[in-house]
Image (spheres, rainbow, N blue to C red):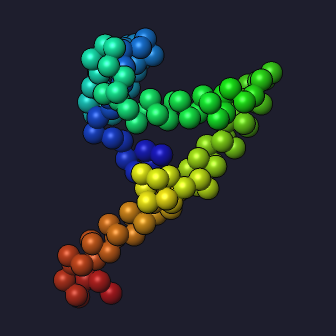
Amino acid sequence: MARFRGYPQAVRTDNGPEFTSRAFMAWAQGHGIRHILIEPGRPMQNGYIESFNGKFRDECLNEHWFQTLAQARAAIATWRQDFNEVRPHSSLGRIPPARFAEQHRQRAGDAAKDQLPNSQID
């Protein structure tokens, strides 16, 4: 997704080994991304990902018994497509994230056009 939207300015994570490893730290630094650690034992400092992880675990991972990596990838891809493109999210005005992102891109494009002199719009 960074190819379309760019990298974030910062990421906030817990203190788990997957986020304090040299590989992750090098990746973040290499892309100019600030790494912010939550306070130990304070998961609500990163509430959005905690909420997502709970939904992903309950609705996808706990619903399947994966026997192969390919099977896991297929089930996760199906869940991700539903989560991003079909399911309405209350925090986004009851529309799917993909539709919200498209509306955001359109508004940003319209705002950029409004700032150009009339001779540059055509």
In the rendered image, the quadrant that contains the C terminus is bottom left
Q: Residue at x 34, y 27 (%)?
A: 44
Report x, y in % for residue 25.
Answer: 34, 20
88 on left or right of 64: left
Let me know if residue 30 appears in the view: no
Number of callouts:
0
Q: Quadrant of residue 71?
A: top right
- 87 w.r.t. 103: above or below: above
- The foreground one among 8 and 78 is 78
Q: Quadrant of residue 58?
A: top right
Q: Residue at x 72, y 30 (%)?
A: 63
Q: Residue at x 50, y 52 (%)?
A: 89
Report x, y in % for residue 112.
Answer: 27, 71
Let me know if residue 34 appears in the view: yes
- The foreground one among 44 and 32 is 44
Report x, y in % for residue 91.
Answer: 42, 51
Report x, y in % for residue 114.
Answer: 24, 78
Q: Quadrant of residue 36?
A: top left
- 76 w.r.t. 120: above or below: above
